[in-house]
Image: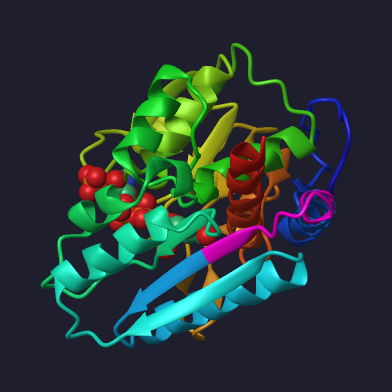
Amino acid sequence: MVRGQAAHPTKTDSMTAQRIDGNALAKTIREEVAGRTQALKARGVQPRLAIILVGDDPASQVYTKHKVNDSTQTGLEATLETFPATLAEADLLARIRELNDDRSVHGILVQLPLPRHMDSHKVIEAIAPAKDVDGFHVASAGALMVGQPGFWPCTPYGAMKMLDSIGYDLRGKHAVVIGRSNIVGKPMALMLLARDATVTICHSRTRDLKALTLQADVVVAAVGKRDVLTADMVKPGAVVIDVGMNRNDEGKLCGDVAYDSVREVAGWITPVPGGVGPMTRAMLLVNTIEAAERTAA
Ligand code: NAP
């Protein structure tokens, strides 16, 4: 459900959580991007995203195809360059430099993971920060940390938009983020902190996860393990954002949260599929149009 300024839920025994519909929200965001794209085109600027895929990882092939399709459908132009897994790192860096210098390209995305012989950090650092629409460059991470304009990583950015969609006021709330990766957990925590939440970051060495999540007004699960968050770990009425992407015993996509039981306790919950996933895709479009608008300003 996508809502305007909703009141914070208070839990009653008979209530199940409101679902925050990532598909619906992503659709709205894509429409906004399409409008902004039209406006730029009217000024003679065609927003353009360059995507690089190295190797033949099947999941990466699917993800990059989606990114191209999403872009095209919103009027952005996306090019997908594919290279064999044997590509030399120096050649990839040289291609990134060319794209950095190409003024018709506004965003550059190198699909991860890269083949083992490449240093992902070095490759990402080669992207011009002004074109870092994935938000993985250290300049983007630094900008987020100090509250300067930059590009936010798409997944936590999408999760924030989901909280905004229910009008959730984070000020003074306790947010618990499970996971501390550079692309999800840490930036998520910084975004929540910037909105005046009190933030706890948990990870594999956290001693008593349940004791912490039970205190949380907002829980973000970004681990990559099924049932990391179960109903007995959730405070009634809490907002639960499920970033995880896993497979259940039937091979179906599922998150980190035991959805069916947690929704009986939580106030708001994001599903998997149809939650953070589509929002991640939508936020790449937002970052790309933002990059194009900044250069056209
Ligand atoms: P990651 O780099 O593997 O990080 C996982 C984090 O979970 C680590 O910080 C790890 O702790 C922590 N962890 C592992 N076991 C734990 C446990 N039992 N209790 C508490 N914390 C635990 O993964 P990621 O890239 O952040 O991704 C996390 C999940 O989100 C994955 O399922 C991924 O597929 C999904 N994802 C989804 C999207 C989307 O668009 N929906 C986008 C990105 C990622 P340590 O640091 O101590 O190892």
Q: Which residues are magenta?
A: 39-49
Membership of 265 in magenta stretch: no
Instruction: Pick the residue in front: 154 or 172.
Output: 154
Q: In what quadrant of the picture does the C terminus appear? A: top right
Q: Is residue 178 above or below residue 32?
A: above
Instruction: Pick the residue in front: 93 or 137.
Output: 93
Q: Is residue 153 above or below residue 173?
A: below
Q: Is residue 278 above or below residue 103?
A: below
Q: Position of residue 295 (x, y in %)?
A: 59, 41
In this image, 100 relative to 239: left or right? left
Instruction: Pick the residue in front: 28 or 131.
Output: 131
Q: Position of residue 159 (x, y in %)?
A: 60, 44
Q: Is residue 28 above or below residue 226?
A: above
Decide if residue 215 is in sight here.
Answer: no
Membership of 41 in magenta stretch: yes
In this image, 39 relative to 128: left or right? right
The residue sitting at 48% across, 65% down in the picture is 245
The residue sitting at 84% across, 43% down in the picture is 14
Decide if residue 58 is in sight here.
Answer: yes
